[in-house]
Image (cartoon, grey):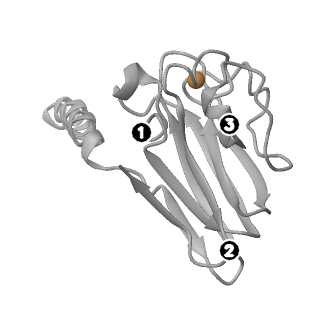
Amino acid sequence: MSATLLALPLVGFGTVEAKQVNHGAQAPTWLTYNAKTHTANLTIIAGYSSDAAGFNFNGSSKGKMVVSVPSGTKVVVTFSNNGALPHSVAFSSYASRTMASGFKPAFAGSESPNASVGIAKGPKQTVKFVAGKAGTYAIVCAVPGHVSAGMWDTFKVTTGGKASISTK
Ligand SMILES: [Cu+2]
């Protein structure tokens, strides 16, 4: 009996170590698309990697991640922050990629709550909007100064076609 009790914590400790080792190799599924319901589920993690000193989404900064959806898509974003600084997400005008502050959502509801303040590491937020008008937009962190540090990516709304995600 005493041998079993001693062994249990050791097994548990080994499991935690294995998860940490594998963390970087198991990237989340960033985007899924349901053509029947015209719904795109998008995972956005701020500060996911050390790219641009942490000022990145899903490990990409400065426009290098391109998320594309057909116009009329219901976009459901699951947003969280893996970084040390507070971050947010907003789907804003493409011109926003050169702004320092004052970001506005390009679609009704296309920003996380209190976006200029952001959230700390830990909780998840859901952002839902309809990508109504075809065009090129920017995915930005609306915390002032973060876009200037590289924290923006590219969002394209296409006329027809499929949802896709790519990194340069
Ligand atoms: Cu930020």
Residue 60 tag number: 1
- Disc 2 or disc 1, which is closer to the eye? 2
Amino acid at circle 2: Thr
CB-based contact (under 8 Å), mark 2 and mark 3: no
Element assignment for label 2: loop
Task: Provide residue 139's location: percent of width, then percent of height.
Answer: 61, 41
Q: Which residue is mark 2?
A: 159
Q: In the image, what residue occupies the spot 57% across and 62% down?
A: 68
Task: Give the CA distance from mark 2 to mark 3.
Answer: 21 Å
Left or right relative to 114: residue 5? left
Which badge, 2 or 1, is on the more N-terminal residue? Answer: 1
CB-based contact (under 8 Å), mark 3 and mark 1: no
Which badge, 3 or 1, is on the more N-terminal residue? Answer: 1
Task: Give the CA distance from mark 2 to mark 1.
Answer: 25 Å
Screen quadrant of the N terminus: top left
Task: Provide residue 116's location: percent of width, then percent of height.
Answer: 74, 21
Residue 24 tag number: none
Amino acid at circle 1: Ser
Residue 95 tag number: 3
Q: Where ligand 1 lies, by image quadrant? A: top right
Task: Give the CA distance from mark 3 to mark 1.
Answer: 18 Å
Say which of 49 and 135 sits in front. 135
Q: In the image, what residue occupies the spot 20% across and 37% down?
A: 21
Say which of 53 and 133 sits in front. 133
Amino acid at circle 3: Ala
Task: Provide residue 102's location: percent of width, then percent of height.
Answer: 78, 23
CB-based contact (under 8 Å), mark 2 and mark 1: no
Instruction: Find the residue positioned furthest to the bottom.
Output: 36
Local crowd size for mark 1, using a 10 Å CA cut-off: few (<14), some (14–19), many (≥20): many
Element assignment for label 1: loop
Q: On screen, 33 above or below 45?
A: below
Q: On screen, 154 above or below 41?
A: above
